[in-house]
Amino acid sequence: QTVVTQEPSLTVSPGGTVTLTCASSAGAVTSGYYPNWFQQKPGQAPRALIYATNNKHSWTPARFSGSLLGGKAALTLSGVQPEDEADYYCLLSYGGARVFGGGTKLTVL
Amino acid sequence: QVQLVQSGPEVKKPGASVKVSCKASGYTFGSHGITWVRQAPGQGLEWMGWISAYNGNTNYAQKFQDRVTMTTDTSTTTAFMELRSLRSDDTAVYYCARDLYGDPAYWGQGTLVTVSS
């Protein structure tokens, strides 16, 4: 059973920059895992932010960016806003199946 | 605009089955796949599987392989997820999501399924 690991929690100051990562128990994450990133606020459905490593949806704010970093998928928020406080989930593809990470609770303080 | 409207909350007894629907509108239904995801109370997201709305091909998470069936009805542009032999740990919000570029992008509002005796 493949496990996808994210930081359980991170804290960032408004206006700051923070990077969330997503690791696979199967080894280094590459573009072939088609990393996706989602944001979820309490009581709401998830919202897609990034697909295929670093591609933004039309609704994704410019301050969000995706990349590969040190064998992991990464989501960087630059110029963090208070409304970015949320849970963030990555999703990796393993052939036909996909696995979510456990999520990162981002606090803006 | 793309909209996915899911069926209402369900309460089921252990051992029963539940069928959640996801009514799609605002796009050509057969052109995009549908992913199903669930979230237990206070927990993270769990990928359950995917169905092609074009030809009905499916990929299920191994965990649900024996208990889940995903289908689509092109005449009503609706996707369905049936989960059988329900247990208390199946209590969760179930989401459908439409693909964009092969990845889940547009999400339904979620359906709470409660399993309790």
Image (cartoon, rainbow, N blue to C red):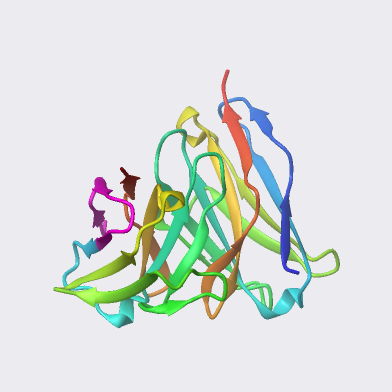
Identity of the residue drawn at 59% across and 29% down: B114
Residue B22, x across and y down, in percent: 71, 55
Residue in the picture at 61% in, 37% down: B112
Q: Is residue B79 magenta?
A: no
Note whether B29 is above or below A11 in the view shown.
below
Where is residue B60 drawn, in percent x and y? Answer: 48, 61
Single out the residue that lies furthest toward the left.
A70
On-image quarter of the C terminus of chain A: top left
Q: Nearer the viewer, residue B44 or A79?
A: A79
Q: Which one is in front, A105 or B84?
A: A105
Extreme residue toward the front, this view: A15
Q: Which residue reaches farthest right?
A: B75
- Nearer to me, B69 or A26: A26
| For residue A90, side relative to residue A18 (left or right) | right
Segment colored magenta: A1-21
B71 lies above or below B18: below
Give me the residue at 58% from left, 18% from top.
B117
Q: Quadrant of the N terminus of chain A?
A: bottom left
Coordinates of residue B69 in the picture (x, y in percent): 60, 55
Q: Tally the marks.
A: 0
Is A18 magenta? The answer is yes
Which quarter of the figure has residue B70? bottom right
Nearest the viewer among B49 and A72 is A72
- Position of residue B7 relative to residue A23, above or below, is above
- Residue drawn at point x = 43 percent, y = 80 percent: A55
From this view, report whether residue B72 is shown above or below residue B83: below
